[in-house]
Image (cartoon, rainbow, N blue to C red):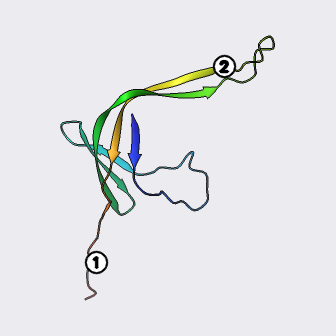
Amino acid sequence: MMIEMQGTIENSGKPLSDEVLGSLSWRRDDNEALLLVGHHLLEGKVSELEKPFLVVRPTPGEDIHTKQRTMTIDAVIKRRLVFKNRPKPLVTQLSSPS
């Protein structure tokens, strides 16, 4: 499944490869999801892609006879999770000092 979001995800300049984006949870019917990123909540819906999307990566090296490179298919994506609305800010109420 592919996740589609509007806007920009900002980080502190570190690579995102091992970072956690947020917490994803599903509603009961599995067609809607909630994504909690920091203090923001996003609501998304699952939709089918018109055409499948392939995730490919180059295979190291090349064929010495044809000088062609091969690709490996890692995944076939048929659905996407779309977050099209702005995130809702989550506000926590601070207790007043006594």
SS for dot 1: loop
Q: In this view, does 16 lie above or below 56?
A: below
The first of marks 2 and 1 along the sequence is 2
Percent across and percent down for residue 89 are 31, 66
Quadrant hosting residue 78: top left
Residue name at image x 78 percent, y 17 percent = 67
Query: Given the current orientation, which residue lies at the most extreme bottom position?
Result: 98
Residue name at image x 18 percent, y 36 percent = 29
Query: Given the current orientation, which residue lies at the most extreme front position?
Result: 50
On the picture, is 17 further left or further right than 6? right
Distance between mark 2 and mark 1 Cα atoms:
57 Å
Amino acid marked by disc 1: Leu
Query: Given the current orientation, which residue lies at the most extreme right position?
Result: 64
On the picture, is 30 further left or further right than 80? left
Q: In this view, does 68 lie above or below 26?
A: above
Percent across and percent down for residue 75 are 48, 25
Most foreground residue, 77 or 91: 77
Image quadrant for the C terminus?
Answer: bottom left
Quadrant hosting residue 90: bottom left
Task: Name the residue carrying label 1.
Answer: 94
- Contact, CB < 8 Å: mark 2 with mark 1? no
Q: In this view, does 58 lie above or below 29?
A: above
Task: Name the residue carrying label 2.
Answer: 70
Percent across and percent down for residue 47 are 29, 36
On the picture, is 46 further left or further right than 2? left
